Amino acid sequence: MIGATLARPLQAGTAAVGEFIDEFFAERLERAARHGDDYVRLWESARDGAAGGKRIRPELVLAAHAAYAGSSTTEAVRLAAAFELLHTAFLMHDDVIDHDLVRRGAPNVAGRFALESIDRGLPADWAHEYGEASAILAGDLLISGALRVVAELEAPRAVRRAVLEIVDECVFLAAAGEHADVRHAVRHAGDAPGERDILAMIENKTASYSFSAPLQAGAMLGGASAASVARLGEIGRHLGVAFQLRDDVLGVYGSVEVTGKSALSDLREGKETLLIAYAREHPDWAQAAAGFGTPELDDAEAARLRSAIESSGARERVERLIDERCAAAVDAITGSDLPQGLHEALTLTARACVERAR
């Protein structure tokens, strides 16, 4: 899912969100104790997986809510925390899909249970299967918990139902985007995804739950009109696509010292991004493509791939599309009746999507 952080201007403050999440896990751990040590460890690993993120989504919720309600409320904090729980769940499931055992420099849920099982003398294959099953269950539990938090918001019934529909739809779309991403990765020869496929996947997998839904849900809870909520969905969609496209460029051309991510990993994985879709349209790609998607890809082969992407014009086209999406977001912001503070913050966020280096 989002692998780099946005140097974002939204600074609504998420200390209260962190406190709520701590309380959420404390209550679950107390309940889990009645079901044995392994279940406690599952919840502990889920709790640890929720720690250390930048919490972009909660900030968007709180900023949108405060813009319409005048200040943050306990219910806005609960809603913001629900989005962070969803994000954590999606990361856990994403790691299983990618067979990753590490997240943020430490063993993830799957990694922790696999390593513990190996230490107990279990075969590696069984240990990894148990680890991935544990991560799937942990993610399921957090999705369920997030939906319960939203369902229990103290708000007028119509508002609570509208917020729940926004959250439900973003989960629905994120799954559609993830499923498409996996399909792209296991494509048959000659069946590579094109621009339309990849942009649709990004809008569903990233833009919906990371930008559109947090803005819409926070605004809806704060009393925004249906027109404003719809406009925030449009703005969030453009911001989310620009964010992910920038992430994809950094995944190939970024500096590991700045991004914290190797510029080889996406190429070794064979990640189907718009850079690759555009590059395939040019003869230069065919001459360099042999190493794409091979775990043994070395620096020299990666350099040839980057050169082919450059010479094909793919990077320039993606950079132009990032600019266009950010401009579309700014146009949507400018043509809206958003409160001034939110108007300014989202405009700065759009610019940050273009300029960020990590």
Image (spheres, grey):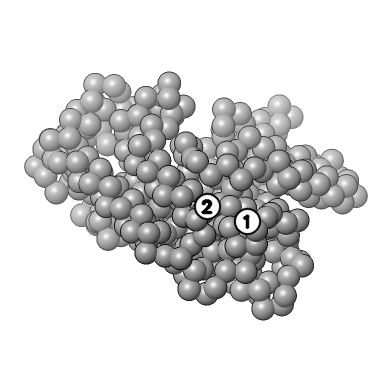
Amino acid under disc 1: Ala
Q: Quick one: 220 or 167, which is closer to the camera?
A: 220
Q: Disc 2 designates what residue?
A: 341
Q: Residue at x 19, y 41 (%)?
A: 316
Is residue 337 positioned above or below 114 on the image? below
Q: Residue furthest left?
A: 283
- Crowdedness near tag 1: few (<14), some (14–19) or many (≥20) residues, C-alpha within 10 Å: many
Number of callouts: 2
Is 283 placed left or right of 129 in the picture? left
Of the image marks 1 and 2, the number of the one nearer the N terminus: 1
From the image, state whether disc 1 or disc 2 is nearer to you: 2
Q: Position of residue 130 (x, y in %)?
A: 66, 43
Is 271 placed left or right of 313 in the picture? right
**Which quadrant would residue 157 be assigned to in this image?**
bottom right
Element type at mark 2 = helix
Q: Tag on residue 66?
A: 1
Q: Residue at x 25, y 56 (%)?
A: 195
Is residue 218 positioned above or below 139 on the image? below
Q: Quick one: 277 or 161, which is closer to the camera?
A: 161
Please indicate, yes or no, whether residue 163 appears anywhere in the rendered image.
no
Tag 1 and tag 2, C-beta contact below 8 Å: yes
Amino acid under disc 2: Gly
Q: Quick one: 192 or 168, which is closer to the camera?
A: 168
Q: CA distance from mark 1 to mark 2?
A: 9 Å
Q: Residue at x 57, y 38 (%)?
A: 54
Q: Residue furthest right?
A: 34
- Crowdedness near tag 2: few (<14), some (14–19) or many (≥20) residues, C-alpha within 10 Å: few
Element type at mark 1 = helix
**Which quadrant would residue 126 be assigned to in this image?**
top right
